[in-house]
């Protein structure tokens, strides 16, 4: 961690990003990203096994695709709260839930590491890739655990290390020579790959007071449907860690970077799509008391 960064400044950076530009970018690309994450999300929802009548919290819920599925799983006698930093995403999530006629899900804009949850109120904490952005993850998961009832469950998905996720790694390595230099994040700094190290995830959850921790790998593929390599490159460049760098780059460098991404994706293009491996952890734990 560079000398001028602390858990608080790292956290503040994530809050600023997702409340603003990050949320807007996610919203603009949401349909394709959601398609990419749908299969993984379904596996996590199956593992979470939400039951009729349960109270569920969906952390970092984005536009609420998983919150709506959870709302259907818990039925009219259950409730789901979707929580996210982005006001724009919460407005869209509410609109979609209303359009689907779901009355048992609501959405709130807020920071999950500090939100005023009713203590001991929740049966299930769920997240599809929304819990890797806390500056102090032990403190954040301690706070989240206190929202759970005794024996309440935690189920979430997070990415395994960057180098194991070709969907992020292949475009990044191709583009990075053309992009402005970026500070190298520490291995556990908040961001999509903060929970790549299984031992670190276990330490965080144990430190936060969780028990019965299981962390299992899921291997899958990200599919970027595109009619040309240029289109695939534009898509692949807009998800993952280089989105911010690309936005900050001068136009000429941006074009060179996307060109290089296209070339790097060529070996992965077949039948109208680029397929790149995804590697994540399915994490489960229980609040013991
Ligand atoms: C990678 S996106 C995943 C969104 C959604 N779960 C999905 O699968 O479509 C991560 C989400 O976590 C949210 N997030 C990050 N830090 C958060 C925090 N401290 N509190 C609440 N939400 C947070 C972001 O705003 C973003 O919407």
Image (cartoon, rainbow, N blue to C red):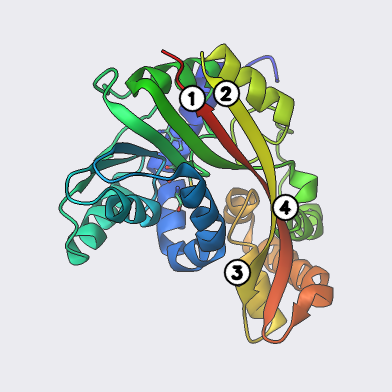
Structural distance between the alpha carbons of marks 3 and 1: 37 Å
Q: Which image quarter: residue 222? A: bottom right
Q: Earlier in the sequence, mark 1 or mark 2?
A: 2
- Marks 3 and 4: which is nearer the front? 3
Which residue in the rendered view is the most extreme toward the right?
Answer: 267
- Tag 3: Cα neighbours inside 10 Å, few (<14), some, or many (≥20)? some
Q: Which residue is mark 2?
A: 212
Residue 145 image position (x, y, % from top left): 42, 20
Residue 62 image position (x, y, % from top left): 39, 49
Label 1 residue near ligand 1, CB within 8 Å: no
Q: Quadrant of the C terminus?
A: top left
- At 48% from the left and 25% from the top, the residue drawn is 286
Q: Which residue is mark 1?
A: 286
Query: Answer yes or no: do the residues labelled 3 and 1 have beta carbons within 8 Å?
Result: no
- At 58% from the left and 12% from the top, the residue drawn is 207
Q: Which image quarter: residue 238? A: bottom right
Label 4 residue near ligand 1, CB within 8 Å: no
């Amino acid at each position: 961690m560079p000398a001028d960064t602390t858990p608080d400044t790292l956290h503040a950076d994530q809050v600023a990003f997702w409340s603003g530009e990050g949320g807007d970018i996610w919203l603009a690309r949401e349909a394709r990203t959601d398609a990419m994450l749908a299969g993984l999300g379904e596996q996590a929802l199956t593992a979470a096994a939400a039951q009729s009548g349960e109270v569920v919290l969906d952390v970092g819920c984005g536009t609420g695709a998983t919150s709506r599925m959870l709302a259907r799983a818990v039925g009219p006698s259950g409730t789901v709260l979707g929580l996210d930093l982005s006001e724009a995403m919460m407005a869209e999530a509410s609109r979609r839930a209303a359009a689907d006629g779901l009355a048992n899900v609501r959405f709130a804009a807020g920071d999950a590491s500090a939100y005023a949850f009713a203590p001991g109120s929740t049966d299930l904490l769920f997240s599809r890739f929304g819990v890797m952005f806390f500056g102090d993850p032990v403190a954040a998961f301690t706070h989240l655990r206190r929202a759970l009832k005794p024996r309440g469950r935690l189920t979430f998905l997070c990415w395994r290390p960057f180098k194991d996720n070709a969907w992020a790694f292949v475009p990044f390595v191709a583009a990075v020579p053309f992009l402005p230099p970026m500070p190298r994040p520490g291995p556990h700094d908040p961001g999509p790959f903060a929970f790549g190290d299984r031992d670190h995830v276990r330490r965080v959850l144990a430190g936060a007071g969780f028990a019965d921790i299981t962390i299992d790998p899921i291997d899958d593929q990200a599919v970027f449907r595109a009619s040309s390599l240029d289109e695939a490159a534009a898509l692949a460049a807009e998800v993952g860690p280089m989105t911010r760098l690309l936005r900050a780059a001068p136009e000429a460098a941006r074009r060179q970077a996307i060109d290089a991404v296209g070339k790097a994706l060529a070996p992965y293009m077949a039948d109208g799509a680029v397929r790149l491996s995804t590697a994540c952890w399915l994490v489960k734990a229980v609040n013991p008391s």
